[in-house]
C-alpha cells in the first residue's frame, strides 16, 4: 500500500514513519510513505504558498494553486507506476471532517494508493478542496496546529491492518474495538509484582476457562470505561446473561 502525503513539513512525516513497525513494513516493501512538499509547487520565486483571506480576518490561507499542482504531480507518479490504477482517494485532514474510527481504518486499508492532504494556517482555499478532496477526516474534537500528526495517526492505524505489516496477523483482529469491545487485561512474568498477583485462571492452562475469563473481562471493561461502545457490541446469549 502506498501513502502520498501532501505537506509543508515533509520531515515531520518522514520521521514519524522511520521507527518501529512502520519502518519495518516499509523496508519489507509492503508499505511506502512518500511526503511531497507542497512548497515545491508554489509557482513563484519566493516559494510562497499562503496569502491573506478574501473578506479579511485573522491568519493566512493556503493558496489553491500549489496544492492542486502538487496533487497533479502525485497523480502522474501513480499513473506512471500503474497504468490501470483507479483514481486514488484524497483525504483532507481537518477538524471539520468525520471522526476517524477503526471501521474507517479497515475500509481504507483495502486501497492500493491513498493521498493525504495536510493543512496549515487558517485552512486551504476552498476551490482546491472542491477540486481534489474525496474525504474529510478528523482524528477527534480538538484542534492541532496542522494535519501532519493526524496524517501519521491515520497511516499508523491503516497500515497495521494491511496483511504482513504485523508479525501476528491475529492480533490486528482481536485487539480493542473489534466488535466494539475493549481488550481484556494482559499480564507477563513475574507471577507476583509488588504484592499483586496474576489472576489464577491465567496460570491454569485451562484454555476454555481462560477464554471465558477474558471475554467477561472485555465486557466488564467496556461497560466501565466505554459505556457508549457496549450498546454497539456484538454479544451472544451467554454474554448477555453475564
Ligand atoms: N487538523 C487540525 N486539527 C485536526 C484534527 N483534530 N483532525 C484532523 N486534522 C486536524
Image (cartoon, rainbow, N blue to C red):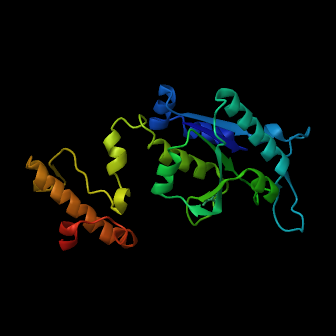
Quarter of the image for residue 218 reads bottom left
> Can you tell me which quadrant of the image ligand 1 is in?
bottom right
Eyeballing the image, is 187 above or below 212?
above
Left or right: where 102 falls relative to 94: left
Residue at coordinates 26% horizontally, 56% vertically from top-left?
185
Q: Quarter of the image containing the C terminus?
A: bottom left
Q: Which residue is farthest right? A: 45
Task: Pick whichever, 83 or 26, lies toward us.
Answer: 83
Quarter of the image for residue 44 reads top right
The percent position of residue 128, horizontal first and vertical second, equals 79, 53
| Residue 197 seen from this side | no
The percent position of residue 103, horizontal first and vertical second, equals 46, 56
Q: Quarter of the image containing the N terminus?
A: top right
Eyeballing the image, is 219 above or below 163?
below
Task: Pick whichever, 89 or 152, lies toward us.
Answer: 89
The percent position of residue 195, horizontal first and vertical second, equals 15, 56
Count of picture labels:
0
The percent position of residue 11, horizontal first and vertical second, equals 65, 38
Left or right: where 90 falls relative to 62: left
Task: Pick whichever, 76 or 197, lies toward us.
Answer: 76
Left or right: where 1 falls relative to 124: left
Residue at coordinates 22% horizontally, 46% vertically from top-left?
188
Residue at coordinates 47% horizontally, 26% vertically from top-left?
28
Eyeballing the image, is 6 above or below 210?
above
Residue at coordinates 32% horizontally, 66% vertically from top-left?
222
| Residue 88 seen from this side | yes
Left or right: where 181 falls relative to 49: left
Amino acid at each position: 500500500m502506498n501513502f502520498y502525503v501532501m505537506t509543508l513539513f515533509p520531515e515531520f512525516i518522514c520521521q514519524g514513519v522511520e521507527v518501529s513497525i512502520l519502518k519495518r513494513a516499509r523496508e519489507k516493501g509492503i508499505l511506502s510513505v512518500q511526503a511531497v512538499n507542497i512548497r515545491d509547487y508554489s509557482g513563484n520565486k519566493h516559494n510562497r504558498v499562503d496569502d491573506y483571506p478574501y473578506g479579511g480576518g485573522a491568519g493566512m490561507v493556503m493558496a489553491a494553486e500549489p496544492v492542486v499542482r502538487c496533487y497533479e504531480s502525485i497523480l502522474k507518479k501513480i499513473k506512471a507506476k500503474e497504468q490501470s490504477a483507479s483514481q486514488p482517494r484524497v483525504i483532507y485532514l481537518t477538524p471539520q471532517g468525520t471522526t476517524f474510527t477503526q471501521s474507517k481504518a479497515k475500509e481504507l486499508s483495502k486501497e492500493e494508493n491513498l493521498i493525504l492532504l495536510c493543512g496549515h494556517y487558517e485552512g486551504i482555499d476552498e476551490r482546491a478542496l472542491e477540486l481534489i478532496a474525496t474525504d474529510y477526516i478528523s482524528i477527534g474534537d480538538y484542534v492541532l496546529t496542522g494535519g501532519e500528526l493526524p496524517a501519521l495517526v491515520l497511516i499508523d492505524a491503516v497500515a497495521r491492518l494491511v496483511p504482513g505489516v504485523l508479525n501476528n496477523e491475529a492480533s490486528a483482529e482481536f485487539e480493542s474495538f473489534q466488535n466494539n469491545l475493549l481488550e481484556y487485561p494482559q499480564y507477563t512474568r513475574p507471577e507476583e509484582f509488588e504484592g499483586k498477583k496474576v489472576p489464577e485462571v491465567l496460570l491454569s492452562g485451562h484454555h476454555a476457562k481462560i477464554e471465558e475469563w477474558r471475554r467477561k473481562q472485555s465486557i466488564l471493561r467496556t461497560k466501565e470505561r466505554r459505556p457508549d461502545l457496549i450498546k454497539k457490541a456484538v454479544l451472544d446469549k451467554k454474554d448477555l446473561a453475564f
